[in-house]
Image (spheres, rainbow, N blue to C red):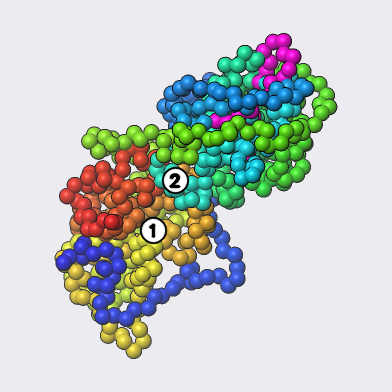
Amino acid sequence: MTLLSHCAPAIFMCLFAGCVLVPVITAAEKKPARQKAAPPHLEYFQQETARLGKQCLAGIRSVEEWQGRRGEYQRQLQEMLGLWPMPERTDLKPVITGTLEHADFTVEKLHFQASPGLYVTANLYVPKRLEKPAPAILYVCGHAQVMTNGVSCGNKAGYQHHGAWFARNGYVCLLIDTLQYGEIQGAHRGTYSEEQWWWNARGYTPAGVEAWFGIRALDYLVSRPEVDRDRIGMTGRSGGGSYTWVVAAIDERVKVAAPIAGITDLHNQVVDGVVEGHCDCMFFINTYRWDFPQVAALLAPRPLLMGNSDKDRIFPLDGVVRLHQKVRSIYELYGATTNLGLLITEGPHADTQDLQVPVFRWFNRFLKREQPLIEMAAVKLFAPGQLRVFDQLPADQVNTRIQELFVPRQGGQASAGDPAAVLRLLREKSFGGWPGKEPSVPLCLISETRGQGGLRRVYELETQPGIKLPLYLLLPESGAPGKVVLTIIDQESWTNSPAAFLWRPVPGNEAADSPPGQLGEGRAALAFLVPRGVRPAERPSGAKATAQMRRRYMLLGQTLDGMRLWDIRCAIRALTAAPEFRDLPLSLVAGRTMGVNAAYAALFEPVVQKVSLTECPKSHREGPDYLNVLKTWDLPEMLNTLGNRLDLLTRNP
């Protein structure tokens, strides 16, 4: 039996059979004494975030240059939302299920279908005594769960005071529920708390569904005879502020926008950790590695009021100000800085009157061309249950499983085409967060010891600035090796066999420190790479912290496993570039999700002659999560491309 027929722990048992080993823990891996450690990978996140921030909207010096890019930027945003190509605008099938009367307006309780079975519940506030089509507001709600007797009334009930105020002041106002907090309650928190990492692989984000709700709501508004389709504004706060940004960025029927507390920059999200306060509906799949000012700039030169409070902890003011400054540079190109407003009020993340009144004035100014004194407050006038649309939820609804349907599968035929074209597609859509240049990392020797059974070396690989990884090497005691076997260590392997990396004999048993002289069939040089996030010192404490670290990678247009794949490629390049191993055949050994990372590394590094995998997942739904990979293919198709280089030892049942 060869070394290649074992998973990583089995290799360690073969190498050190009969030895009693204890781990050596380095100083960096010791727990700090009652001191809060810096988040793992912080230096790396700081550098990557700074890089994306620096390149955002950089080098645009004229309106013509901006307009030349703007169309492609809109297309990219649609793609990152799962809206490219744009879904078919099927029949909305609007149904009004009831009305409420007020002295100044009527409320229509209605639903429509953004796509077949994808229901949007809404309230339409229509002023009485309209003599001609009026300006309209699309109001998108934030995260407010409103329940009556255990039944959801939709977050439109929590934000009803906005609809009533606009209607009392001459606007038609449509309030729409969100996916998670509507009357039919879908999911927003797949990666946040539900470990649905395959959302990344599918290219799915609920932000895309919310954007689609907004686009179809505009379709409904312009169909109403009461609405002046040339005077439509859009606003919302918190989650509604976020949806306002993306809808207005890609749908220019929104003539005036006032998103409130719905956006900040990547530095706040990634470095300051604000991402931990937001579910998935706030973010697109960042395939093209944007910072958020790029979304906001797509509204220029249309009137845009950015509102925020100075003590908002999930949309910190410093990031909002930085974002405003970058967006202002685009408005300056148009000579339209009077169309850009920054509203800062005192207070926390809350729906305050201080934020509401300036928004009302903004729409009056640009949609009505008037600025009357605001004399009434926005108040709630109805009990939540009065605004409920459904008495019974429709049996054909797909809201609760839209994550399975929203982004169509586009793969299945990729492996039958040009392999080089497939790699280019993966490089662009799944691994766009890799460095621009091909891996070129030298082996940096840290230590070397000689025992009775072989030569032991510890190397350090800096695969990216701030990412320094150990590579352990065991060589025959005498004579040159005939091949190199690189084992990729995952967390389970580390936990089960930690002594395999830094070993020493137990005192009084020094003679036991003697691996088999041949080090396996073919006198192999045995290398062990520990990718990022495997060693205890590089792992967050607890499942929640781990999820938030992985989401930080996602916001940078990467995934943790996608960057581990980069680490493996760097190790392969480093070993094959070393003079003593340059002409030797190289094989990879790995298990579970890390085995898939190794298999992909072999695709990108054809020098790898054999890949031996154990307990390989059946699908990318099980892992690893690479952005958009399920749009290209799934694991069976990928593994087939390895041909006779693949040694698939065991599968999961």
Above or below, 137 against 593 in this view is: above
Residue 53, percent across and down?
A: 55, 41
- Sequence-earlier tag: 1 or 2: 1
Answer left or right for 361 relative to 459. right
Q: Which residue is mark 1?
A: 531
**132, above or below 441, in the image:** above
Quarter of the image where one finds residue 34: bottom right
Question: Residues in magenta?
Answer: 120-144
Q: Looking at the magenta stretch, what is its main secondary structure? A: strand
Please give the residue where the numbered disc 2 appears in the rendered image.
Answer: 558
Which structural element holds mark 1? loop
Quadrant holding the C terminus: bottom left
The amino acid type of the residue labelled 2 equals Gln
Going 72% across and 10% down the picture, which residue do you hit? 131
- Horizontal and vertical percent position of residue 80: 46, 35
Q: Is residue 66 magenta?
A: no
Left or right, 181 with respect to 523, comes to: right
Tell me the residue at 74%/27% (across/down).
Answer: 165
